[in-house]
Amino acid sequence: MTFSSKIKKEISTTECTRAEYLSELSGIIRTGAEIKIYNIKMQTENKFVANRIFGLFKILYDINLNISLRKNYNFKKNEIYVLELKRDTLKVLRDVGIINEKNQFLKLPSESILSDEELTRAYLRGVFMVSGSLNDPKTSRYHLEFLINDTEYANFLNDLLKKHNLNSKILHRKKGYMIYIKEAEKISDFLRLIRAYNGVMYYEEIRVYREKVNMTNRLNNCEQANVEKTIATSNKLISEINYIKDNDMFDLMDDKLKETAEYRVRYPEASLIELSKIISLETNANISKSCLNHRFRKIKEFADKIKEG
């Protein structure tokens, strides 16, 4: 079972008020149904979604939808559940805000369907059931998407998601529009919004784990970069010290500089702090990091003077 199917299975058992059921059904019909005046046809490969749709009509109207199965030979040979309503269609379409009292089609849902937060959540839950998909965060990139056919409706859904600060974006495709969310935190917020609480827990667990791994990798990269920087700086100074020795000028430096130079050559991979501790321990003299850095600068200046003749 895909991660999307697991989420749809979870939300397919959500218990709501009658008004919320109507809003959810509105999202399902408007987004995923073929609508005619005397026939509403819905198709899905997901048996849990099919059961939910059947259950909504039973709860709201005590109607048993006609259900049939057919094979899908496009890519996967899955069975497709075809659900059809062939009576009381006008009443249903009016109730779910798809047509008005004059039986005229409304391009966008009526205000009553989205009049408060809970109804909006129910509506988005219905939309996700029939047009949404979600990658498993354990095996793939963070990605949630909806496939929508109509331009105006796609923009409406995108705006609805943005009102909940989900940072959704819209992309035009050959066969309609894709509304998508890429941020892990925002996808988790959407799952909470549609009451997929088990999905939220799973998603957050994976997200936190990945963030820990990424943080560890960043820290390791920083540590490695610091080591490489220390070695590069050390090698450059050792090169200057060797240049001074090659020109028989080493004994012209004072004893402190000569001592520091010898320790640098002896411990090329030690950082400033590490080298200052080593010198302090072996010479019984308190040599600070800044003092050591000052001596290194003096050695470099001495080498530069030799190069200038």
Image (cartoon, grey):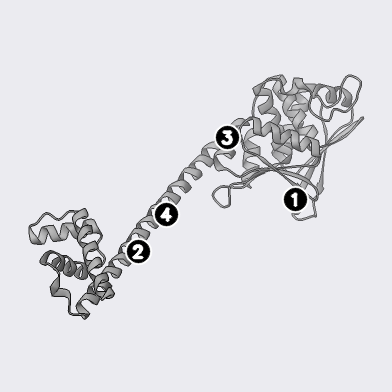
Q: Which residue is mark 1?
A: 78
Question: Closer to the observer: label 1 or label 3?
Answer: 3
Q: Quadrant of residue 231?
A: bottom left
Residue extending farthest to the left is 284
Above or below: residue 164 compared with residue 288: above
Instruction: Name the residue type under label 3.
Output: Asp
Q: Which residue is mark 2?
A: 228
- Distance between the alpha carbons at the discs numbered 4 and 3: 26 Å
Q: Tell me the CA gap for discs 4 and 2.
A: 16 Å
Q: Pick the residue in front: 53 or 212.
A: 212
Q: Which mark is residue 217?
A: 4
Q: Earlier in the sequence, mark 1 or mark 4?
A: 1
Q: CA distance from mark 1 to mark 4?
A: 41 Å
**Which residue is at a point 20% across and 58% down the rendered structure image?**
292
**Quarter of the view holding residue 237:** bottom left
Instruction: Check disc 1 and give the amino acid type.
Output: Asn
Residue marked by disc 3: 189
